[in-house]
Image (tube, grey):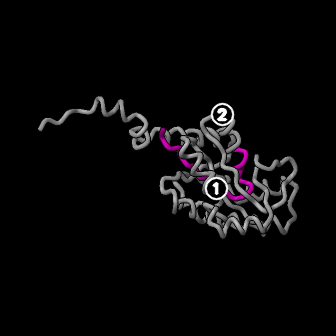
Amino acid sequence: MHEGILFIVSAPSGAGKTSLVKALLDRDSGLALSISCTTRAPRAGEQDGVHYHFIDQTLFRESLAAGDFLEHAEVFGNLYGTRALDVRTSLEAGQDLILEIDWQGARQVRERFASAVGIFILPPSITELERRLRGRGTDSDTVIAQRMALARTEMAHVDEYDYLVVNEDFDTARATLAAIVTAERHRLARQRTRLSRLLDRHAPRVDA
């Protein structure tokens, strides 16, 4: 069985990452979302084990000390992390997997999975990003200012990714994401592994 592909998707808050990934997953049964752990409280409509594994800080830090996390980060006082065993199990089963993580987590993942494919989603402009954040109606001016400052920091790391997708038009951005996934599945190195019997059978013979 071939190993699955690990996709890392990062974006500043408000760029539409979560909605784009959900739309991609809805249309591609070969993709699955890695469920991360977090110490923050569930938001309205979020379910444990579906959106996140919601755990307390004590358990998170115990797991971190035990080396259970592939990556981890602290954002606005909350801890987030991806369990290494969950990722390895999915990939070894041939499952293509998406990690929704920030640039810090992405850097940690690439240290252990060099073949991971990094995708960064950009807003069309900083002005539009702030408009989207304010349009949510869920954050105070102070929190929005914090998110905007963090967004600038995150966008300074785009050179660490393989692909950039600008989410100006949602359907176009979704189609671009889908095209990246398709292209990666058809890389020669991956196809050679999957189709080794066919390719070896028709390889030219070299006489001694």
Residue for point 70% across, 55% down: 36
Q: Residue at x 51, y 63 (%)?
A: 111
Of 79 and 119, the residue lying toward us: 79
Is residue 53 toward the left or the right of residue 71 in the image? right
Q: Residue at x 61, y 38 (%)?
A: 175
| Residue type at tag 2 | Arg
In the picture of the structure, the residue carrying the numbered disc 2 is: 27
The image quarter in which residue 59 lies: bottom right
Q: In x, y percent, where is residue 58?
A: 78, 68
Q: If you read the primary sequence from the N terminus, does the residue marked by circle 2 or circle 1 appear first? A: 1
Disc 2/disc 1 C-alpha distance (Å): 20 Å
- 111 part of magenta stretch: no
Of 181 and 13, the residue lying toward us: 181
Whether residue 155 can be seen here: no
The answer to whether the residue labelled 2 contacts the one labelled 1, judged by CB atoms less than 8 Å apart, is: no
Measuring from the top left, give residue 203's x and y in whole percent.
27, 33
Identity of the amino acid at label 1? Ser
The C terminus sits in image quarter:
top left
Report if residue 185 is visible in the image: yes
Q: Is residue 78 above or below residue 17?
A: below
Q: Quadrant of residue 21?
A: top right
Quarter where residue 65 is shown: bottom right
Whole-percent x, y for residue 72 in the image: 66, 64
For mark 1, give the secondary structure.
strand
x and y, in percent, of residue 207 in the image: 13, 35
Judging depth in this view, the residue of 168 and 116 nearest the camera is 116
User: Which residue corresponds to the image point at 35% horizontal and 30% vertical from the top-left?
Assistant: 198
Q: From the image, tell me which residue sits under label 1.
A: 10
* Crowd rating for badge 1 (residues with CA inside 10 Å; few <14, some 14–19, many 20+): many
| Range of residues picked out in magenta | 1-20
Give yes or no for residue 15 being in the magenta stretch.
Answer: yes
